Image (tube, rainbow, N blue to C red):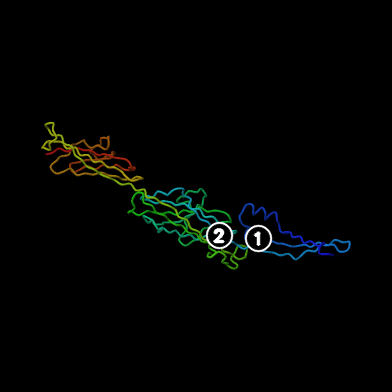
Amino acid sequence: MTYAQTRIVSSVVVLAATLAAQQAHAANVAAGTLIQNTASASFTTGSATRTVDSNAVTVKVDELLDVTLVSKDSAPVSISTGSAVLTYQLTNTGNGPEAFTLTANPTVSGNQFTTTVTSIAYDSNGNGVYDAGVDVVLPSGTATPSVDQDKSLTLFVIVTGPSAMTDAQTSKVQLAASAVTGSGTPGTTYAGKGQGGGDAVVGASGASANANGALVASVATVGLVKSATIADPFGGTQPVPGATVTYKLVATIGGSGSITDLRLTDVIPTGTTYAAGTLKLDTATLSDAADADAGKASASGIDVLVGTAAAGSTHTVTFNVTIQ
């Protein structure tokens, strides 16, 4: 046999086609996969061709710990006096199933107001929208369910805004995720902690990620202006006894969003008498009695419940009194 007659051939023994299919659909070979490899040598001695195989070498793939986290909100989420929901997407970019611990931080540098984080939940029904009472709230300190390789989990952070925020102020909430198995400098190894009994190795992400969700305050404001016009008994505008004073209360809703339970009240001034049947809200005449309509009036004052009012709207209440 001569060296020129000898050639070495390498072959993958364990399901090469299966591994190729896995790599076509996923970034990484699954943790715990056994990769086996043998070599063969063929040669000619005399008139005979012979082949010999090497021993098989088996490598068990370790678990790679990697994760990404992004905000799923296409624009800042509006927040007013109630709660708001920020949506994030966590993707396990490692090669084995992994759970992740979550932390929400509402004190991001540059915030113009600070929210209160009331809960973190995950999308248990998979519709991408937070459903209170349906989606699972994660108690403080608990981890997400195990997320399979190359799969994603939609997360929700529910917050409430402070009463002191003003319209158009902005704020952010940072959500952070870390692999339960471990995180740290890329390449850090957790012996025996990987899927399938191998090691777990921290990937390029450090096995942790964070993303900011954005909020914008949508706070309506109320401006109230009162004016009076006078009609005296002689066709003039002098405030003499017997003259009628028409009071006008104009509420203008500014900012954005809407307000609820808007109520306008006024006291009948001393030295005047309320003119029965003159109470109006915008163009609607209201009865003086406390009944089904929005207002009531008496010798002591008027009370009108406007209710819900949207930013940009204006509501006017008028009533008459007579100077005694």
Alpha-carbon span between mark 2 and mark 1: 18 Å
Q: Residues within 10 Å of mark 1 (few under 14, many from 20)?
A: some
Quadrant of image for the C terminus: top left
Residue at the bottom extreme, as displayed? 191
Give residue 286's mark.
none
Q: Which residue is mark 1?
A: 33
Residue at the right extreme, as displayed? 47
Residue located 43% across and 59% down the image: 105
Q: How many marks?
A: 2
The image shows residue 130, relative to residue 208, as above or below, that is: above
Query: How far across and down, in percent of the image, does residue 98 sit?
Result: 56, 60
Asked whether 70 or 262 is in front, the reply is 70
Give the residue type at disc 2. Answer: Asp
Residue at the front extreme, as displayed? 4
Query: How far across and down, in percent of the image, does residue 102 sit?
Result: 48, 59
Corner quadrant of residue 268:
top left
The image shows residue 133, relative to residue 269, as above or below, that is: below
Query: Image check: 123 left or right of 113?
Result: right
Query: How far across and down, in percent of the image, does residue 261 sit?
Result: 31, 45
Asked whether 198 or 119 is in front, the reply is 198
Q: Which residue is mark 2?
A: 66
Helix, strand or loop at mark 1:
loop
Query: Image check: 309 left or right of 213?
Result: left
The image shows residue 222, relative to residue 236, as above or below, that is: below
